[in-house]
Amino acid sequence: MELTVTQENLTRALGAASRVASTKTQLPILSNILLRTDGHRLMVAATNLEIASTQLIGAKIINEGAITIPARLITEFVSSLPKTTVTMKVTDNKLNIKADGYTSTINGIVADDFPELPTINEKTAVSYSIDTASLKQAIGQTILTASNDATRPVLTGVYWHSHEGSLYLAATDGYRLSEKKLVATKSDVSAIIPTSTLQEVLRTVNDDINEVEVLFDETQVRFRLNDAEITSRLIDGDFPDYRQLIPATSESVITLPRADFAQITKVAGLFARESGGSVTVTADAEREKLSLHSVASELGENTSEASATISADGQVTVNSRYLIEALGVLDCEQVIFRFSGKLSPCVLSSDQKDSDYQHIIMPLKS
């Protein structure tokens, strides 16, 4: 293999692939990045057997071929080179790299030993083309409520599923739940995508990508981002029937500016650190005030309040961090916060009639 490529393109591709390459593995080849010519382009790929990342970059191909190289070394080396043309040549499983006064030889492993990259039958796969901004928002609004508990694998991903003609994303850790309606669909989809895969998608998306193609088969999902692809196994199992947890109506419905709610929650949270983030939310319909009270037994206590439109008095105790994070991913001026007494789930959403996102927080026992 012999080729030339720009340092900037190679650095970007190696950076994306190296994030997927496994550092803790009994298979040394999984710590390597695969470099392989593909027509007039260079393919840069890595896999940890759960996720595979492939990047195609333009190159001047002199001789075709392939090799695998230690991911960390080549990524850090190439990123340190000046922004110029990089020449790479393989001789006896060694990669020789030259660039503007820098010459290096890196020992590689023959490409035949690299695991076969996953494939998806595009003719039978369920496919969506999703606006990049919408996809980034949907992932960001749901990924934060996914669980880290490996003993319940189905909760460690985001559930992509069709329901009444729309594609929804949902995630829950048992204490909170988020649901986002994304696009219309005529296909049936039910797939749990690992959060690590979705985090990698967010890292790979850039301003040059207008649309992301998402393909599902029975066991895998593929995200195609221009010349980059991320393919992942799906999490096996059945996601819980979460819709029964979302109350259709609530006794206390509070509408107020999102910024005001975030501010009083942040201040109350400072005094709630000793009590596991516990803050008591009180809705006062007569005064038209929403107040948050928190107590730090050794330090003091705090009451913060904001003006709001309130349907009925009510009180509930919630985790302030959950509330702050939920308010942080809402992209609206006014929010609706609703609950029914101290034991019913709290629902946070935009006040817009066509709101496609809702965030549910389970109350704490006060």
Image (spheres, rainbow, N blue to C red):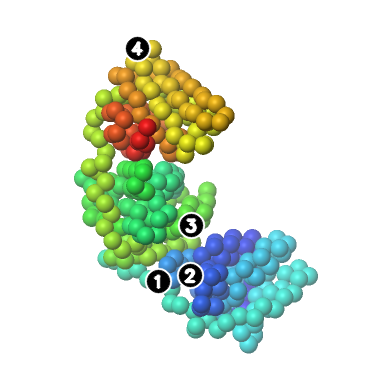
**Residue of label 3:** 200
* Helix, strand or loop for disc 1: loop
Drawn side of residue 161 relative to residue 68, left or right: left
- Nearer to us: label 4 or label 2: 4
* Helix, strand or loop for disc 2: strand
- Decide which of tag 4 and tag 2 comes sooner along the chain: 2
Give the x, y percent position of residue 151. 37, 60
- Decide which of tag 1 and tag 4 comes sooner along the chain: 1
Drawn side of residue 79 relative to residue 121, left or right: right
**Residue of label 1:** 118
Q: Report the Cα–Cα distance between label 3 and label 4.
A: 48 Å
- The C terminus appears in which quarter of the rendering? top left
Q: Amino acid at mark 1?
A: Pro
**Residue of label 4:** 286
Give the x, y percent position of residue 195. 42, 55
Q: Amino acid at mark 2?
A: Thr
Residue pictured at 40% horizontal, 46% vertical? 145
Q: Report the Cα–Cα distance between label 1 and label 2.
A: 9 Å
**Residue of label 2:** 47
Contact flag, marks 1 and 2 (Cβ < 8 Å): yes
Residue pictured at 66% horizontal, 65% vertical? 76
Q: From this viewpoint, is residue 129 visible?
A: no
- Decide which of tag 3 and tag 4 comes sooner along the chain: 3
